[in-house]
Amino acid sequence: MDKNTVDAIKKAIEGLDKKEFNIHFFVMDTQGNPVAGVANMYEHVKVLRELGYNANILHEKNDYQRVNWLGEEYSELPHLSVESKTLNLRPEDFVIIPEVYANVLEQLSTLPGTRIVMSQAYDYILDILPPGKSWRDYGVSKCITTTNTQKEYIDKLFSNTIDVSVIPVAIPEYFKPTEKDKKPIISVMTRDQRDLVRIFKSFYLRYPHLKWITFRDLRGLPRELFAKELSESCLAVWVDDIAGFGTFPLEAMKCDVPVIAKVPNVIPEYFTDKNGLWTHDINSITDLVANYVQAWLEDSEPTDLYTEMGTTAKDTYTIGQMTKSVEEVYTKIFNERKDELINMLPEELEGEVIEISDNTEETK
C-alpha cells in the first residue's frame, strides 16, 4: 500500500474520531406533499445534528421543494443537490438511501464512503432491484428500518447477509388531545383515494340519517395543522394494505381519537386486541363507523378502548426514545466503519491507532 493511500485512510479515521465527516440522507422530492417516510428521514438528520454530526438532506434536482409542511426548523436543515455536482464523497462519509432507489445505489457503488439502505416500506424493496440482485451487489452491507417485523422480513429476503438495525419512528409532541369538544368529523387516511371514496359513499347510502357527519381527508395538510385537525375529530379511519409501520393510527391514539382500520399485510407492532377497532374486511368499515358514531352520540363509547389507547400512546414512540436509538445505532455504524479502515492499514501501522473508551483515538 502506497503512502498516499495510507495517509488517506489515516485522515478518514481521524475524521470519524472528530465527527468531521458527512452523513447524506437521500430523499425524494414530494413536491410539497407530506410523506411520513420523508418526515422520518428529516427527523434522523435533525437528531444527528443535535448530537454534533454533520448530517444533511441530499436530493436529486436543484429545484427540490423544501418540506414546509414539516415546519421551518426542518426546511432550514442543510440541503445538497446531486444535480449541482458539488457532492464529494470521502471514505469516511455515509449516504443513507431509501430502498426504492436501487438505481441510486448502482450510481454510487464505485464511489468511496459507506452506503446504507433506509427501508421503511418493505413492499418497495423489490420494485426496482433487478432480478437476482442484492443490495450486497452495490456494496451495501447495512440497513436501517423502523420495526422488528420489517427487520425479520429483510433478514429472510437477503438470507441474513445484511446487517439490519431498528430505529423506531417518533410521533411529534404536537399530536395530543384537544382541549375542545370533539367534532362530528371522521378523519380518514388511505393510500388509495378510491378507498376513501368507497367508505364515505357507502356510509351515506346505508346510513342517510347520519349524512351530517363529515369525512375529512387529511392528506396534504402541513404537519401541525394535520395534528390539530385530527385531534378535533371524533373518529379516525385508516386503510393502507402495504404499510410497513403506519404512523396514522398512533398519531390518532396520541390525540385520544379512536381508530378504525383495515389490518395491513404486515400487522403493526403496536396493534393490540383492544386499542383500536381492527378488521380484515374493508367492506365492514362502514358498519364499524356507524356503530361507533352512534355510541359517541349517545356518550356510550367503550371505556376499555380509551384506556388501551392511552396505554399505547403514553411514553411510546417519543422523540426521546428515537433520539436514544438514533445515537446508539449510528454510533455503532460509525465505529464499525472506523474498524474497517483500521483493518485496511498494513499490519505494521495498525498499532498506531489506539481505541479508548470515549470514542476518540490517540496516536502513539
Image (cartoon, rainbow, N blue to C red):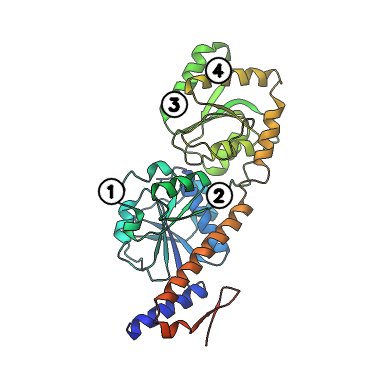
User: Which residue extends farthest left?
Assistant: 131
Q: Secondary structure at mark 3?
A: helix
**Vertical side of 184 occupied by 255: above or below:** below
Q: Which mark is residue 130?
A: 1
Q: Position of residue 193 (x, y in %)?
A: 42, 29
Which corner quadrant holds the N terminus? bottom left
Q: Which residue is mark 2?
A: 168
Mark 1 falls on what kind of element? loop
Q: CA distance from mark 2 to mark 3?
A: 28 Å
* Residue at disc 2, secondary structure: loop
Q: Check contact, mark 4 vs mark 1: CB within 8 A.
A: no
x, y percent for residue 115: 39, 61
Q: Residues within 10 Å of mark 1 (few under 14, many from 20)?
A: few
Residue type, numbered disc 2 = Pro
Could you tell me the amino acid type at mark 1? Pro
Q: Is residue 50 left or right of residue 141?
A: right
What residue is pinned by disc 3?
195
**Disc number lying in front (1 or 2):** 1
Q: Position of residue 39 (x, y in %)?
A: 50, 48
Kindly identify the amino acid type of the residue bearing the numbered disc 3. Asp
